[in-house]
Amino acid sequence: MKIFLAFFQGEPNHPISSYSFWPYYIKNGIEEAGHSWIEDKQIDWAYGMVPQSTSSLEKWKSIAWEKALSLIKSERPDFVLSYLYPHLIDSVAIKEIQKLGIPCVNFFCDNVREFIKAPRAFEVFDLNWVPESNALNLYKSAGYKYIHLPMPMWVDPKQREISGKELFEISFIGSRDLQRLLLFNQVFELDTELPLSIYGSGWKETKTSSNSGVAPLSLYNKAFFQAKFIQKEGIKGYIRKLKQRKFNPVITPKLMSHLNGKPSFDDYLSITKHSKITLGVNRYDSYRYPLLKPDSYSRLRDIESPMLGSCYLTEDNSDIDFLYVKGKEIETYSSAEELISKSRDLYENPQKRNELRQAAQIKALNEHSISRSLEKIIQTLL
């Protein structure tokens, strides 16, 4: 199969959240599956996520989709595979592609974080690749065609060996956010001796952002942004936002000693693979849920860490039941107390750790690979 890709390829230094790993994963995964991919290297798909004016975005969309259509008409791929946010979608162009007999498949993660209902723009796709269990009803209610598959993850075969060397204790790698801060403050309030090291951006920085020098918003702009917020998060979310405006938790001294900076890519791999226990945190910041009762959904790390051969302890949610057998392939927790108790149990049981490493890696590489997902997508499209 030849697949046209619109999967966040672009210039590497746009002022947006990390994105360059997506084309790296999907391209290597396609090749490992025995398929091929094509792209127009002149299209910067990531640029559509850069903050810009409406006129600038529309100009970019027109040029990008015109180039995409031209290449697709000449190369005739078997299908199009994209990772597109709603505002990046040109339904007219996609329908032109479909008239050629070429189906279009769109992957989107963070559905439960981003949407209250499936975006109207996703209706045009022949198939929507949906990784979150709790997002399936959004697509079902909208009547959109969808397939429930894990997030697309690929690790280099050289990194798939399971090493017997445990060079680190318990490790978490991830950037700082409010929910992670609250969780780890609670963990070390309960157990100051837990041998957990935390790595990632934002944990060691002490400077806070300032709005000094920024012109205040006009009443019109304030009303506009408030309306957009309510549209996305709902009235209850807006009320929670107002209540939390003065809530500013800080890193406690007990947590401070466990913090580290952002590791290099090589260090990231080494820490993930060679820790006695690799920790996942799946809760996320959202005004749709009470601050102390956050929602949780499975992240890319839930596929990557087992593929790398880690002993994996992650936060429970409905996605985990779709991915693994708890207690046999990975372990899960639902509270700070359970995180501590599961960590302590695994820490004292090297045989259990090794069993989890072996079983989870087999499951992830065999069942949750891009190769396996492409196989299911192709079967559905045929």
Image: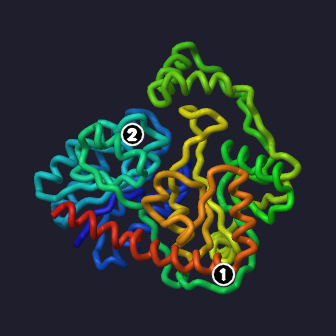
Q: Is residue 263 above or below residue 137?
A: below
Q: Going by the image, does 277 lie left or right of 226?
A: right
Judged by depth in the image, the label closer to the viewer, 2 or 1, is 1
Secondary structure, mark 1, is helix
Q: Quadrant of residue 161?
A: bottom right
Q: Tag 2: Cα neighbours inside 10 Å, few (<14), some, or many (≥20)? A: some
Residue 208: image quadrant is top right
**Residue 330's image quarter?**
bottom right
Residue 255: which disc?
none
One can see residue 24 in this view: no
- In the depicted structure, whether residue 352 falls above or below residue 41: below
Which amino acid type is shown beneath numbered disc 2?
A: Leu
Colour option used: rainbow
Residue 57 image label: 2
Mark 1 closeness class: few <14, some 14–19, many ≥20 residues within 10 Å: few
x and y percentages locating residue 63 in the rendered image? 30, 48
Left/right of residue 121 with respect to residue 197 in the rendered view = left
Disc 2 to disc 1, how far (Cα)? 55 Å
Q: Position of residue 334 (x, y in %)?
A: 62, 51
Q: Amino acid at mark 1?
A: Gln
Q: Is residue 174 left or right of residue 141?
A: right
Q: Which residue is mark 1?
A: 351
Determine the residue positioned at 79% across, 58% down.
Answer: 259
Image height of 189 relative to 247, above or below: below
For image coordinates 57% across by 67% down, the residue present is 327
Q: State the image coordinates of residue 336 (x, y, percent, origin top left).
A: 71, 51
Q: Quadrant of the C terminus?
A: bottom left
Residue nearer the viewer, 366 or 322: 322
Q: Say which of 28 and 165 sits in front.
A: 165
Q: Residue furthest right?
A: 253
